[in-house]
Image (cartoon, rainbow, N blue to C red):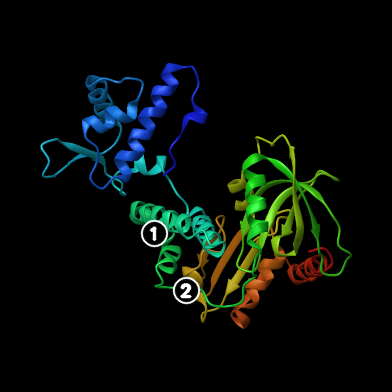
């Protein structure tokens, strides 16, 4: 759980007190044994008195599910319960599976660089975070947590990524820096774009950098495995505040972003029950037909990845709309071969 430090403080005493209270809440949630009033007083700083510590504890009790911890000490201890019954605090410290993946990547990099003490310290932090978030994320990210504990895995081919490249991209994303790199396309000469990075799309086949090309000012996707010689230019760019990565990705079937199209699929009786369990897209509509078939419709972009997925269903599915679906898919494949 992220604590806010002195770099965020200013001369506004009310703002500073709010940050102190936030950090006390983080400690009360992450500590198994909880905090005493003396420890709360220490964390409030600025010569806080015991009465101030009591007011802070009372304020947190009004905001969150605070419980008294049983202990053998003469002093009482309190902690914040972090589980699905305490959504107010869980939403405040929401941690995604992708963020945990980044943490595991950092641990791996430290180990490879021989920084074993730092890797061990970060690994302990990872254990604490997973413990605190496991219940909350069990439904949403069950596959990730199972794989993280060695209880499940996803076999099959996957691209190997240069960790230095990923770290460079992450730094640029955090600081809104333009980056420059050599991009190796399938059937065209390499070129060197300068881009303004906005996010990363993690796909089953490849991971893509979502960025604005400074040459034509268009938002594009760059396959990260085809990026080499990446350089952080340290040039700041002004972020488009109206851009939202989640909303951007909701339009997509996979990793590609084009104009959305309406798609209607017809699954026969052999595939109906299995198809009912799939979530094809967040806009999908399912309809069971009198003849025992299932109609699935949705509006999304990324016709090439739709085609790749539909092929896996074999003869059990037909594309009803659009009528020229496979022709469009062939054109998208050619574009992918020439430009990606």
Image-based side of 208 in relation to 28, left or right: right
Image-based side of 262 in relation to 281, left or right: right
Image-based side of 309 in relation to 333, left or right: left
- What whole-number distance in Å separates the C-alpha atoms at marks 2 and 1? 17 Å
Residue at 76% of width from left, 60% of height from top? 228
Q: Quadrant of residue 227?
A: bottom right
Residue beneath label 1, please?
A: 139
Q: Nearer the viewer, residue 230 or 203?
A: 230
Q: Quadrant of residue 52?
A: top left
Quadrant into which the C terminus falls: bottom right
Q: Residue furthest right?
A: 189
Q: Position of residue 48 (x, y in %)?
A: 30, 21
Residue beneath label 2, please?
A: 153
Q: Mark 1: give few (<14), some (14-19) or many (20+) Cα within 10 Å.
A: few
Residue at 72% of width from left, 34% of height from top? 238
Q: Position of residue 84 (x, y in %)?
A: 31, 49
Q: Nearer the viewer, residue 139 or 123?
A: 123
When the figure is inspected, residue 93 is found, relative to residue 133, above or below; the finding is above
Q: Is residue 88 visible?
A: no
Q: Is residue 96 visible?
A: yes
Q: Position of residue 89 (x, y in %)?
A: 35, 40
Q: Nearer the viewer, residue 283 or 186?
A: 186
Residue 36 image label: none
Image-based side of 223 in relation to 133, left or right: right
Name the element at disc 2. Answer: loop
For the residues carrying marks 2 and 1, which lies nearer the camera in this image?
A: 2
Name the element at disc 1. Answer: loop
């Amino acid at each position: 759980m992220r604590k806010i430090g002195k770099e965020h403080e200013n001369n506004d005493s009310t703002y500073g007190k709010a940050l102190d209270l936030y950090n006390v809440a983080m400690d009360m949630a992450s500590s198994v044994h909880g905090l005493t009033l003396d420890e709360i007083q220490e964390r409030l700083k600025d010569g806080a008195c015991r009465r101030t510590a009591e007011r802070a504890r009372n304020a947190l009790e009004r905001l969150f599910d605070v419980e008294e911890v049983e202990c053998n000490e003469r002093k009482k201890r309190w902690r914040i319960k972090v589980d699905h019954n305490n959504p107010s605090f869980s939403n405040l410290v929401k941690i995604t599976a992708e963020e945990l993946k980044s943490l595991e990547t950092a641990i791996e990099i430290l180990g490879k660089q021989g920084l074993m003490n730092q890797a061990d310290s970060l690994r302990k932090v990872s254990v604490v975070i997973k413990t605190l978030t496991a219940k909350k994320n069990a439904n949403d990210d069950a596959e990730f947590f199972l794989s993280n504990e060695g209880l499940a895995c996803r076999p099959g081919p996957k691209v190997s990524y240069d960790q230095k490249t990923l770290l460079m991209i992450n730094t640029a994303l955090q600081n809104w820096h333009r980056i420059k790199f050599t991009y190796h396309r399938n059937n065209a000469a390499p070129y060197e774009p300068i881009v303004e990075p906005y996010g990363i799309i993690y796909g089953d086949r490849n991971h893509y950098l979502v960025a604005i090309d400074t040459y034509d000012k268009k938002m594009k996707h760059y396959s990260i495995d085809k990026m080499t010689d990446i350089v952080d230019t340290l040039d700041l760019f002004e972020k488009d505040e109206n851009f939202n990565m989640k909303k951007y990705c909701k339009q997509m079937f996979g990793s590609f972003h084009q104009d959305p199209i309406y798609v209607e699929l017809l699954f026969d009786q052999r595939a109906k029950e299995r198809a009912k369990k799939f979530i094809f897209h967040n806009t999908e509509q399912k309809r069971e037909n009198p003849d025992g078939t299932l109609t699935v419709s949705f509006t999304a972009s990324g016709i090439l990845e739709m085609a790749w997925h539909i092929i896996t269903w074999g003869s059990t599915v037909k594309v009803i709309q659009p009528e020229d679906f496979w022709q469009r898919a062939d054109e998208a494949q050619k574009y992918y071969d020439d430009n990606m």
